[in-house]
Image (cartoon, helix red, strand yellow):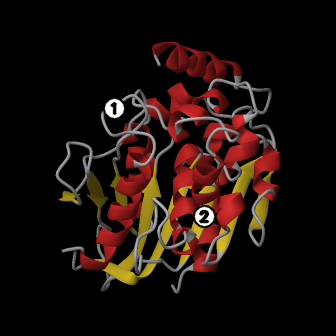
Amino acid sequence: MKMAGLLLAGLISSSVLASPWNRSFSEVQALPSPEPDQVVVYGDGPDQDAEVWLPARPAGPAPLVFLVHGGCWLEAYDRSHLRPLAAALSERGYVVLLPEYRRVGQPGGGWPGTFEDIASAVDAIAGLPIAEADRENSVLVGHSAGGHLALWAAGRDRVGTGEELYREDPFMPRAVIGLAAITDLVDYARGDNSCQRVTPELMGGSPQERPGRYAQASPAALGTSIPTVLLQGSEDAIVPPSQAHALPGAAVRPIEGAGHFDLVHPGTPAFEALLEALDEVLDQ
């Protein structure tokens, strides 16, 4: 597990390409951000809560962004690097929820706990004690491995009765936006970068060993049940741009010159693309 994290760090460093606005993971980590306004709990575990950022001057209930962090599903990467993005979105008038969840390397992380946590956190939107949030005008947004989980949540109503990830009457937001999202777990598991090699750890086996699990957990296999937009940088060295074209029915928005972490840096053109996508899918 430590080796996977070290390999990811090396991959992240090597992904700083020639584009003048390509951002690294360390640059995203270094961005300042205020503390969240609230923390809401969706389970009993230490990683089963969501930080909440509220708009400064809301004029009535505001649209809600449920923001899922990535990091190759690994324990080593928590939500802290997405706090600047959460704060920037709240400054633009959104209520932002940034959940934590059990990850590979933690007790209960991986299959099925990671998925169960995301399901519970999304379902908790319906009962949020946050007056500023418009629950009926909510959108899932996820980056990288968090994009995979957001897209999975947007199609989990298609998981068959009796399957391990089945949940009756799941809460479905208005739309989902993937930022450099992993869409096809089977294809991604075939790759050899450090993040791709974590996929069998998440799933408890390879696609050949666990085909039923991959059928329940891969957005490319499930599809999504709500409008879906995928933002994908052309210079992404961690999630191949081909992943954006593996999800049937998704509207793909290529971002020329963007790398993997431009998608979550509020100081890049990719942030403006995210704001445009939110305007497109939400009832503003």
Q: Where does label 2 land, which residue?
A: 177
Q: Residues within 10 Å of mark 1 (few under 14, many from 20)?
A: some
Seen from the viewer's position, the closer of residues 104 and 78 is: 104
Residue drawn where x is 49% and y is 63% of the image: 163
Seen from the viewer's position, the closer of residues 186 and 98 is: 186
Q: Which mark lies nearer to you, 1 or 2?
A: 1
Q: Which of marks 1 and 2 is nearer the N terminus?
A: 1
Q: Where does label 1 land, which residue?
A: 106
- For residue 187, above or below residue 252: above
Q: What element carries label 2?
A: strand
Seen from the viewer's position, the closer of residues 8 and 92 is: 8
- For residue 156, above or below residue 246: below
Query: Exactly how many numbered labels are in the figure?
Result: 2
Q: How far apart are marks 1 and 2 (CA)?
A: 27 Å
Label 2 is placed on what type of residue? Ile
Q: Position of residue 209 (x, y in %)?
A: 64, 38
Q: Where is residue 67 in the image (x, y as percent from the top left)?
A: 45, 57
Q: Identify the image quadrant of residue 81.
A: top left
Q: Position of residue 56 (x, y in %)?
A: 29, 67
Q: What element carries label 1?
A: loop
Q: Work out whether residue 191 can be spotted.
A: yes
Label 1 is placed on what type of residue? Gln
- Which circle marks residue 80 in the picture? none
Q: Residues within 10 Å of mark 2 (few under 14, many from 20)?
A: many
Q: Position of residue 120 (x, y in %)?
A: 33, 63
Residue drawn where x is 62% and y is 24% of the image: 12
- For residue 21, above or below residue 280: above
Q: Work out whether residue 272 can be spotted.
A: no
Q: In this view, does 59 lie to the left or right of 22?
A: left
